[in-house]
Amino acid sequence: MHADAKALHNRLRRIEGQVRGLQRMVDEDAYCIDILTQVAAVQTALEHVAVEVLDAHVRNCVADAVAGGENGEGDAKLDELMAAVRRFAKVR
Amino acid sequence: MHADAKALHNRLRRIEGQVRGLQRMVDEDAYCIDILTQVAAVQTALEHVAVEVLDAHVRNCVADAVAGGENGEGDAKLDELMAAVRRFAKVR
Amino acid sequence: MHADAKALHNRLRRIEGQVRGLQRMVDEDAYCIDILTQVAAVQTALEHVAVEVLDAHVRNCVADAVAGGENGEGDAKLDELMAAVRRFAKVR
Amino acid sequence: MHADAKALHNRLRRIEGQVRGLQRMVDEDAYCIDILTQVAAVQTALEHVAVEVLDAHVRNCVADAVAGGENGEGDAKLDELMAAVRRFAKVR
């Protein structure tokens, strides 16, 4: 996943820039609602990172373990996957 | 998944009862915060239903298609699964 | 909030019907992804109930306590409100 | 809110560090599930920022407008607040 890793890295650099932008907004005493809007934008960007990582994981790692893995390896990967989905969806 | 279907059905009957309880709370003009707490309880119960259905789907349907499916069937199931995860996690 | 209570009650009756529809889907062994789509519809409907209740609460109860309440009453309502928002937004 | 602004700024600097940590994980080809766990940690940290900003906003800006604002000012603030809560809770 070399090309994907580069795209992911760049995406995270943009997020880093957005977080620095938030620091400036706080320093300059920006209006609360504008800060909240910008926090929401960073959260959306992070969700896209998470979905991309989850997608690559399911298509490569999990699919391989299910299709060709030794006894129980596929099941272990599916357990781990469902735990990640639960955390991601903030299931209470 | 016969046993699971029965458990799921019962879980949904309890949720139906909780929703009727909410109607009574509204009729009796209960305190807003108490209504919100009860709405949150129903949402949590529904999330558990969703996770259970997703779990069964991944372990049966998706795993079978990936392990033994014809050309492209596994990929189609994974596309469908990731779309469901995205919706479930409310990715914007 | 009499008119609103009636609208809210009707909304909850529709949600009750949707939950019964889910029971039928489970009984008839519907496709998992279709069940998940229907669960998501119920969750969206419940969110709208929660937002409506929260909205009425903020505009009546909280606003009154803040505007005219005795010492500390407004603060207590704001504490309670923020706790409800936190739960609603599933802040971890 | 000078003391709070300083605390918020520091919190955002820690988040910036976490995002840089994520870049390193991607560069070093870390295990997907570990990356997802770290993304979730950043999301939790951002939620706490959002709640803190929302809290300060409600207790200062909104409460002032409701308690002493001119005609309609309180209502306008409550509209804006509810829109922010809706976005924050990702109401569909």
Image: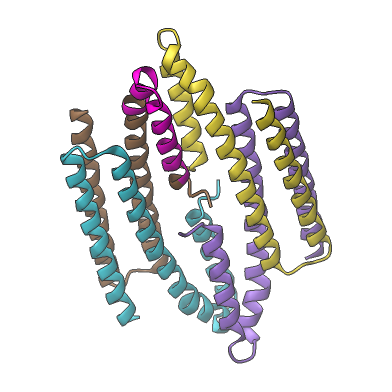
Chain colours: A cyan, B purple, C yellow, D brown
- Which residue is found at the position 55% from the left and 84% from the top? A68
Q: In this view, does B85 lie to the left or right of B41?
A: left
Is residue A35 covered in magenta? no
Q: How far across and down, in percent of the image, does residue A5 sit?
A: 31, 75
Q: Is the magenta stretch mostly helix, strand or loop?
A: helix
Eyeballing the image, is C71 above or below A39?
above
Q: Going by the picture, which residue comes out furthest to the front?
A: D71
Q: Farthest residue in the top direction?
A: C70
Q: In this view, does A42 lie above or below B39?
A: below
Residue A35 higher or lower than B82, as above or below: above
Task: Assign the N terminus of chain D to one quadrant of the image.
Answer: top left
Q: How many marks?
A: 0
| Residue D14 in picture, x, y percent from top left | 23, 47
Q: In which quarter of the image is residue B15?
A: top right
The residue lying toward the viewer, choosing from C40 and A37, is: A37
Using residue A43 as the reference point, say whether residue C73 is left or right of it.
right
Q: In this view, does A33 lie to the left or right of B56?
A: left
Farthest residue, direction bottom? B71
Camera-nearest residue between B69 and C11: C11
Q: In which quarter of the image is residue A47?
A: bottom left
Report if residue D80 lies within the magenta region.
Answer: yes
Q: Residue at 63% of width from left, 44% of height from top?
A: C46
Span highlighted in magenta in the image: D61-86
| Residue at figure coordinates x 60%, y 33% from the top left | B37
In the picture provided, is D40 more to the left or to the right than D24? Answer: right
What x and y, as percent, mark residue B16? 77, 44
In the image, residue B27 lies at what x, y percent?
A: 74, 27
